[in-house]
Amino acid sequence: MAIYAVGDLQGCVVPLEELLDKVQFDSEKDRLWLTGDLVNRGPHSLESLHLVKKLGKSAVTVLGNHDLHLLAQAEGLKGLKPGDTIKKVLKSPDRDELMHWLRNRPLVHFDDSMKTMMVHAGVCPGWKRWQLERYAGEVEKRLRGKRYTRLLQHMYGRHPAKWSEDMPKWQRTRFIINACTRMRYCDAKGRVNFTQKGPPGSQRKGLSPWFEHPDLKCKSWRIVFGHWSSLGLINTSRLVALDTGCVWGSKLSMVRLDSPDQALWQIGCPKVA
């Protein structure tokens, strides 16, 4: 059995199919981790959902911000933004089935045997592993419940920027979602910044990448994530950053997590966004 992790698809299903062929992926014994943002910007969001869903238990994907945005659009809570390419999903005959499947995906995935976790954007400084699992579980429970549209209504916004255990329910939910699906930089006090999107070194003074924050509590875990295309590939024993800008014409990257050298494969992608 092999365990592979692949970066943000954003509707670019053809490069994923090429990577799966290259590693001779066997859905009967191998496992595929996906860092979220299966949809949007690229041309084949519907096909991406179909492929990953069809893989069943051999694939696990965490929710990204674009995936949550699709859920909100499917409920009529948000209009299409410039650059959105998900109309085909919204008009698909199996839309409701796909949306039910999508909102039952986790925010965070843990593998204790490899001491590895996967999240779309990052881990909030100050949160221990058990806290991350607990807080993500709160959101997952609401998203899978009968009143999930209330969560989708309240998830948009940049505030609060700093975690507090005493926040009102919907502020708490919004922060957890933002930390897991949108975070890149934090200040010294752990406040999340949502405006700086460039690579490390381009940010304004006082900000650091979340994974370099001195209060990061999950340093003993290998963290697999996507979301940050300008960051580029990181493939170390502690951090695996896999959004390498496929949708922007760069590459789709795949790493084998259960191999000592964390073997890497990449496929060049045509620019589609």
Image (spheres, rainbow, N blue to C red):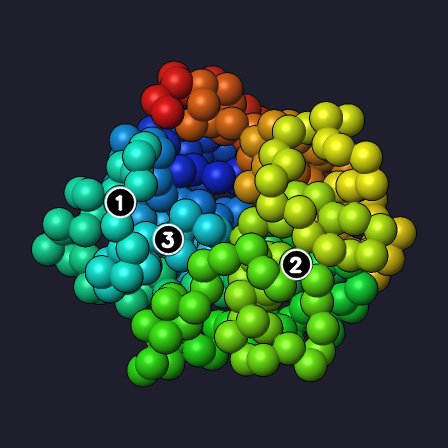
Judged by depth in the image, the label closer to the viewer, 3 or 2, is 2
Among numbered discs 2 and 1, the one appearing first in the sequence? 1
Residue pointed to by mark 2: 161
Judged by depth in the image, the label closer to the viewer, 3 or 1, is 1
- Against 176, is 199 above or below? above
| Residue in the image at 68% along x and 52% along y | 192
Q: Amino acid at mark 3?
A: His
Query: Which numbered dot is residue 28?
Result: none
Q: Amino acid at mark 2?
A: Ala
Q: CA distance from mark 2 to mark 1?
A: 26 Å
Kind of element beneath mark 2: loop
Q: CA distance from mark 3 to mark 1?
A: 9 Å
Rendered location of residue 79, percent (x, y): 26, 50
Image mark count: 3
Of 55 and 169, the residue lying toward us: 169
| Residue in the image at 42% along x and 27% along y | 247
Compared across the picture, whether 169 is left or right of 15 comes to right
Camera sees residue 38? yes
Judged by depth in the image, the label closer to the viewer, 2 or 1, is 2
Q: Is disc 3 in contact with disc 1, using a CB cutoff of under 8 Å?
A: no
| Residue in the image at 33% along x and 81% along y | 147
- Against 252, is 149 above or below? below
Among numbered discs 3 and 1, the one appearing first in the sequence? 3
Compared across the picture, whether 24 is left or right of 204 comes to left
Residue pointed to by mark 1: 80
Residue pointed to by mark 3: 69
Camera sees residue 45? no
Rendered location of residue 5, percent (x, y): 56, 43
Quadrant in the rendering for residue 78:
bottom left
Compared across the picture, whether 219 is left or right of 14 comes to right
